[in-house]
Image: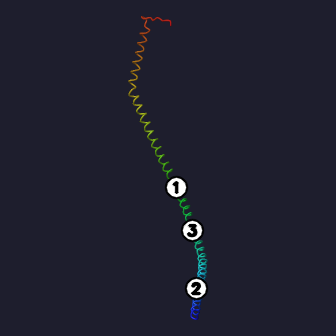
Amino acid sequence: MGRLTNDMARLRREIDNHHNSRREGIRSRASSVSAQLANFKLIRVTNGSLEASDRAAFVAGNNNSVNRLIKGFHTSRVAMGQQDRMDRAAFVSGLAKQTAGMLTQFGADHKRMTQHTASVRASFIVENAASVATLINEFAQDRANAHAEFFSASVKKKAYAI
């Protein structure tokens, strides 16, 4: 039994050594994981504060960009409004000048047409005055002849009762 006991004792030592080495490995891994977790926590806190400051800087930069953009839009809108106002004023002024020119031209054309029409009427009257006078004399003569014939003494008319 000596040999069996020795083998059993040796086996027990090996098992205990193996258990001890496993415990040491587990402890080593646990302390390593603990150290890693602590390191991760420290990095997270550091990065979180850096990220928070970065986010705050980003938001402030965005806010400034948006404010500049709004100010630019406002400035552009005011400038375009002034330009539009000047364009409308120039358009209305040009339209008023054009209308005044058209009215002046219309007045001159109307005066010229009135003078021309008056001269045409006058020449028509002058040209036809002799013809009209002759025609009036002929009508008067025809009327006198018709009157004389109608009321002549040789022919008496009878009045008929109606």
* Residue 117 on image: x %, y %: 42, 34
Q: Where on the picture, by quarter, is residue 4?
A: bottom right
Indicate the secondary structure of the residue bearing disc 1: helix
Mark 3 and mark 1: Cα distance apart in space: 32 Å
Amino acid at the residue labelled 2: Arg
Left or right of residue 127: residue 75: right
* Residue 108 on image: x %, y %: 45, 41
Q: Quadrant of the N terminus?
A: bottom right
Q: Earlier in the sequence, mark 1 or mark 2?
A: 2
Q: Residues within 10 Å of mark 2 (few under 14, many from 20)?
A: few
Q: Which residue sits at x=54%, y=61%?
A: 73
Mark 1 and mark 2: Cα distance apart in space: 87 Å
| Pair 1/2: label in front | 2
Q: Earlier in the sequence, mark 3 or mark 1?
A: 3
| Pair 2/3: label in front | 2
Report the residue that reaches farthest toward the bottom.
Answer: 2
> According to the image, what is the colour scheme of the structure?
rainbow
Residue identifier under label 3: 62
Amino acid at the residue labelled 3: Asn
Residue identifier under label 1: 84
Residue identifier under label 2: 22
Mark 2 and mark 3: Cα distance apart in space: 56 Å
Amino acid at the residue labelled 1: Asp
Numbered circle sitting on residue 36 = none
